[in-house]
Each structure stands twice: as C-alpha cells, then as structure tokens.
Amino acid sequence: MAVSQKRIPAQAVPTKVGSESRHLNAPLGSILLSFNYITADDLKFAQTLQKSSLAPLDRILIAENIISSDQLLAAQSMKYGVQRIQSKDSRPDPALANLLTASFCRNHGIIPWKKQGQSVLIATCDPDHFCANMSAYPELARCTKMALCSKETIYSELIKRHSTEYRQKAETLVPELESYRHQSPVNWGGMKSMAVASACGLSLAFTPNLVFLSIVLWACAALSSTHLLKISAALSRRTPSPLDTPPKPVAKAEHTPSTAPIFKGSMTRVSIIVALYRETEMVEQLLRQIARLRYPKALIEVLLMIEEGDTATLNELDRLKLTNIITVHILPAGPIMTKPRALNYGLGFCTGEIIAVYDAEDKPDTDQIDLAVARFASAPKKVACLQGTLDIYNSKTNWLTKCFTIEYAVWFRLILPGLIRLGFAIPLGGTTVFLRRSALIDVGGWDAHNVTEDADLGIRLARHGYQTEMLSSTTYEEANNQIWPWVRQRSRWLKGYMMTYRVHMRSPKLLLQQLGLRRFVGFQIIFLASLSQFILAPVLWSFWIIPFGLPHPILPLLGPNAAQAVISFFLTIIGADIIISLFALSKTRHRGLGRYTPTLWLYFHLGTLAAFKAAYEMIFDPYFWDKTAHGHSLETRKTTAMRPLVSQSSIE
C-alpha cells in the first residue's frame, strides 16, 4: 500500500523503443546530449567528477540531480538497443515469480517480466552488469532478453511478490544458535532457575549474614574487575598507536562541496542505513548532515528504513525536497519491531561494499566516509568493522547531559580503544559503525531479536575471526536530558547486554575456544561484571551508613579493621573514576566538565534503576524496544531553503 502519490511508482508497461543505429553502443554522454537531456557543461562537470572518483557516468549524473531516472532509461535503451518498461499499466507476469530466487532478484535489481515467444523478458536497472549477473543461470540466460526498468519499479514489484519472504529473512538472518529468538519470556530459566532461586531462599533463611557476605564479595569483585579493566585500558592509551592517526586521502583537489577530498582511484561504494521511527523532529537535521558528507555522491546510497504505519515520519519526508541518492524503504509489519530488523531488511537492498550505520540525531564529521574507506583499503581483510568515536553536542544542557558526555568520553576515548589494544573483543556502539558487507553477511547480519544488536554483533564478529578497530573520526549525538527517558534508554542497553551474555554463554566451552582465554575473560568482565555491578549496587550502598557510626550486620564477619577497609575501597574506586574521567576529557573539547566528575557516582546510581527495569523486561517482555525520543535539545532550526536531499520515490 502506497503512502503518498509522490512515492507511488506508476504502473509499468513495456513500450517498444524505435532503434536508431546511430545511438547503438554510442557513449551515454553523447546520447544524452543529442536528446538535450544535458548540456555540454553538464557533461564536462560529470566527466571531471568521473576522473577523480572513477564512478560510472550514469551514476554521477543521477547522484548530482543532472538527469532523472526516466531520462537515463531512455538513453540506455538507445545505447543497448533494448526496450524500456515504462511506468504505466502493465505488471510482471506472476507465473514467472519463481523463475529466479527472491534474493537474487533483489541483490541484482532484476525481475522476470513476461514471456516473448520462446524467450523471457527480464527487466533490469543495471544493464552494464546484466550478462554477468545472469551467468548464474546459464540455461535461462540463453533464452533471455533484457529490458530496462527503474530501480524503484523493480523493487516495488519484488516486494509485492516477496514481501513476506524478505520480512522473515530480516527477522531470522542470524543463525538460531547465535540469536535470541525463540526464547520463552515467562518460563525464562525453567527448572534450573527455580532450583537456584529455592537454594538461595533457603540459604538466606538459615544463614542470612553468610549469604549477604557472599553477595557483598561478589559485588566488590565485579566492581574491582571492571575498574581494573578500565584502568588497564586507560594506561594502554598513554602511548600513541598508528591507528590513532586517521588515514589521509591519497590525493586532494579543489572541488565543490559534493566532490571534496576523495581517494584517487577509489571505486568503493558505501551504503548508509538509517532506521527511523517517529523521528519527525530529527529528519531535516539528518538530511542536512548527510548532505554535508564529502565522499562523492555517486559512490553513496542512503537507505531510510521506515516502519509501516509511521505516517508522521513519512509526512515529514514529504515536506522536504528529496534527491536521488536516498531511498525510503517501508518495512512490512511483523511480530517484532526493532532497529536490527530494519537494518537487516535494508541490508538486502544495499549495493555498497561498505555498510555504514547512523542514527537519526547524528552529526558525523564531514570526511568520515572518506576515512573509513581509506582504512578499509589499507587494512587486512580480517578487519571487518570500524567503530567511530561518539561525542555529545548538547553537553551543556543540564547535569545529566554533562555526566552523559563524561561517560561517552571515557567509553569511546579510553575504554574501547584500550580494549582493542589489549586484544579484547568489544561491544560496538549503535551508530557510526562501518562494516565490510561480505563479513557482515558472513556472520548473519544483526540479531533482530536483540535490543542491543551492536554489542552482540561486536562479539559475534570476534567469534568468527574478524577484528574491529576504532576510526579516528567523531560523530556528535544528542544525550537524554531527562531522568526517566535516560532510565528507559539505559534499561534497553542493559537488557541487550543480558541478552547478549545469555546467547554467547549457551556454550561457554565453544565461546572459550573461539575467543581464546584473554578475550573470554574480557567478555565476562564487560558483560557479567558490569551487569552485576549495577544490579548489586544497593548492597554496596548499605555500607555508607558506616561513616555515620551506624552498625553494619556483616562487619563482625570481616574483622576489626573491616569498616576502614570498606571505606578505603569505595574512596579508591571513586578516585580512580575521577582520574580516568579527567584523562578522557583531556582528549575532547569538554575539558571544562572536569568539575562534574566527582558527581559521577550519583549519575551511575540511575543505572541500577535501569538494571532492575531491564531484568523485569527480560522475564516478561524481552523483545520490547523502549524507543529513545530525540529532538529535546535541537539547535534552532534554520528557516533557509534546503538543498535537495532525498530521492523522489520510496520502495515499499
């Protein structure tokens, strides 16, 4: 069902194109000139861009909005001497629906259209690679005739035929043994969990002090291990690494903004996927940020993934003037509605060698794509992922955003780079992630049933032998500036950590074999110890009664100097947090936030509330996606007219 007249590709009808021998196999540019679709200056401009990017001329002309897709199809039909399927009143023959697999058709922009005598007319939007693509079906290729059709029409017809198959594949792309799907939300732990709970209850009834002491020791061990890992990561950052220096373009030239410094000889195509849901406040800003990216437009495609029924976001897109490098994909409704499902669905339509993931509120550095392409070009093939640095652009809004900014500085400037240097597997961030498409498909994409698909993917890449590196480029995000939205967002992250831990610990022996001892221990600290730290924090809070001279029930079990030791332990942890935070802030533009570092221990207390919420949902509503609302700290919107930003059609 189409959502607006603007997005509906008109019904397609084959039309016979009169063949003119003078156009057959002629250069595309000269054909476009002869039809007055472009001017000589347009052609010269496009050829200049082609010399620097090596992108196909047709892709450049479309990406720069010099010609329309209809004009391109008309010229290509003359060049190849084949008929063009126009959008009018005919539909592909449903009897041919299973002639080619749904995945093959989607991957190559191909669809069987109708029979013509003993031949089959197959429509394509990529005539240059049609013969190579059809070589996968040699018997069929011998009786095939090529026709030309727009990408929007082909995808629209494919989705009408195979919508259920595409949706189900997006939901089950990760193998079942590595996914969180098919988990019972109520009978979560089964008899084993009931037995453990019963044993704990009996122990607490008969030896409460001993049980409480055991919990305290576990909480202290979790707190100590996470901080030792944090300190080790910070110390590893004291010496510079070659990866700390961003890769530089091989050649620079003076260009217009759309053709700014690129990598000479690069043909790397990049697909950017952005999952949107109720993002009316952020759409215009998002499109502006995409327009600012300096990588050649002809080598970028942007897929906006919109959930079916999200008419508010679609209406906001209708309000804007849209260009050709971005397409809007409407996800069919299914049993779950998560970001990773949307990413998997979009992955099936991507043609880029590199997949980039952004969020709606992101403000990436303008040369970020260039740097990612350069690093992948020089890195070993086993480097499958680059994680960009995330920072906060509304850091001064209130105390909450200030602490959020400090937390991000520690995580992305110290901990993640340090963990990589130390050889650990890292949980990815949910945005500014760049992946080799081949590796992403090899590991099964994202787990559609995990609400922190990024953390899970980082571990799964490591288990399959791939490596992740940090990219020295920054994306600025909006931090939650209200307590309850912060708790809701953090509860989703912690629930995803619980899911990720449970999935990968299904077979601890296999995990140990795949990760090795060092990374296995790191996995336990990053996930189990971190979760324990949040959930068991109230146990440790009870010790703050000691400075007030009040008795604590387990101090007699710890010995005469226990009170002093406990207080010293807590003060050491707080002091380490302050020092690490100040060190992280020194690497950012937020050095002035250093005076807020002593309040971080209060900030992280909110995480305990989020952890309890996450634990409850793990049992009763594991697949619930607690949506983070954005736009509360948006800069004043500009009233100037926007440049064209997104394509004229959507794919449903």
Image (cartoon, grey):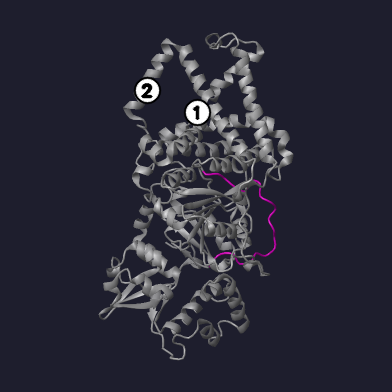
In this orientation, which residue lies closer to the viewer: 360 or 469?
Answer: 469
Q: Nearer the viewer, residue 71 or 90?
A: 71
Whether the magenta-drawn stretch holds residue 628 is answered as yes
Note whether 53 is above or below 629 in the view shown.
Answer: below
Residue 366 drawn at (x, y percent): 64, 58
Q: Name the amino acid, label 2.
A: Val
Q: Dot 1: what SS?
A: helix
Q: Residue at x 46, y 78 (%)?
A: 73
Q: Position of residue 626 (x, y in %)?
A: 50, 41
**SS assignment at label 2:** helix
Report x, y in % for residue 426: 51, 42
Q: Is residue 12 left or right of residue 51?
A: left
Question: Where on the picture, by quarter, is residue 185?
Answer: top left
Q: Residue at x 42, y 70 (%)?
A: 153
Q: Dot 2 surroundings within 10 Å: few (below 14), some, or many (20 or more)?
A: few
Question: Split into 4 quadrants, where in the image is the N terminus?
Answer: bottom left
Mark found first going from the N terminus, 2 or 1: 2
Q: Which mark is residue 278?
A: none
Q: Which residues are magenta?
A: 627-647
- Image quadrant for the C terminus? bottom left
Name the residue tied to disc 2.
Answer: 196
Q: Which residue is mark 1?
A: 532
> Can the viewer see residue 45?
yes
Seen in the image, is 299 located left or right of residue 259?
left
Mark 2–mark 1 Cα distance, whole angstroms, equals: 17 Å
Chief secondary structure of the magenta portion:
loop
The residue lying at 54 percent from left, 58 percent from top is: 378
